[in-house]
Each structure stands twice: as C-alpha cells, then as structure tokens.
Image: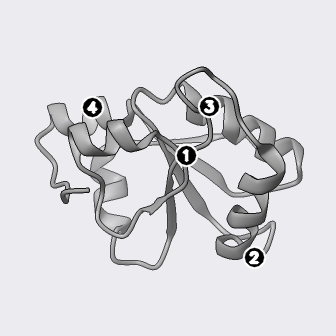
C-alpha cells in the first residue's frame, strides 16, 4: 500500500516545469482569491457545500493521469481536502500520489509565485 506523499512548497516549485501533473481541487472563488500555481489543472472536487461528483471528477482525472504509476500532485487550500482525495486515489490503486504540504496557505505565506485565475 502506498502512502500519500507530503511535498514541501519549495519541492513543488521545482517541479512546475517538469510535466508533473498538478491538480488544484479548490473552488473557483478560491482560485480567484489566491491565484493558482502555474501549469496546475483546475478541477474542483468539493463544492461550497461539501458535495462532490466522483464519477465525473474521475473521468477528468483519468485524462490527465493515464497510468496508476504516474506521479501527480494534488493542491488545495490547507492540505485537508487533498489528504482525503489522495487517500481515496491510493485506495483506487494510484501508487505515486502526492500533495502540496500546507496547501496554498503555506505557498502564499512563503511568497511563492501564483498566476491570476
């Protein structure tokens, strides 16, 4: 069984241009508030009420992550949603599941670059 990998912002920053799939699971209002990490795919998982459509989300996810061995990084605000989603994906057999430690809150606190949404 794989474990969810915590990646510090400085590590994720180095991976931005490496063709590693990064998926920001936050909502549009959050993307507008903080901006987004360059090259991140924007795929909301939970709406503002905590509802989600796993089947549709997985269809989009599988277009980006085409193998269960492929490395990808999940991004949210504080790394709470990504922990839940990451563990769900590990249960589905994804072996190289990582997330941004501290989420966008830590990313912004460390003054790392974002682009406008």
Q: Quadrant of residue 91?
A: top right
Could you say which disc has been placed on residue 66 in the image? 2
Separation of disc 4 and disc 3 at Cα?
15 Å
Question: What residue is shown at x 59% (from left), y 20% (from top)?
Answer: 49
- Mark 4 vs mark 1: which is more N-terminal? 1
Mark 3 = which residue?
83
Nearer to us: label 4 or label 1 = 1
Marks 1 and 2: CB-CB under 8 Å? no
Separation of disc 4 and disc 2 at Cα?
29 Å
Tell whether 68 sits left or right of 51: right
- Mark 4 vs mark 3: which is more N-terminal? 3
Mark 4 = which residue?
106
**Hey, which residue is sitting farthest top in the picture?**
49
Percent x, y of residue 43: 55, 54
Q: Nearer the viewer, residue 6 or 76?
A: 76
- Mark 2 vs mark 3: which is more N-terminal? 2
Marks 4 and 3: CB-CB under 8 Å? no
């Amino acid at each position: 069984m794989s474990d969810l990998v915590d990646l510090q912002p400085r590590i994720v920053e180095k991976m931005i241009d490496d063709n590693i799939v990064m998926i920001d699971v936050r909502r549009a209002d959050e993307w507008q508030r903080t901006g987004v990490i360059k090259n991140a795919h924007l795929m909301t998982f939970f709406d503002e009420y905590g509802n989600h459509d796993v089947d549709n989300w997985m269809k989009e996810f599988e277009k980006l992550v085409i193998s269960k061995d492929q490395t990808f990084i999940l991004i949210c605000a504080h790394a709470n949603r990504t922990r839940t989603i990451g563990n769900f994906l590990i249960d589905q057999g994804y072996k190289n599941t990582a997330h941004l430690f501290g989420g966008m809150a830590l990313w912004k606190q460390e003054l790392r670059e974002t682009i406008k949404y």
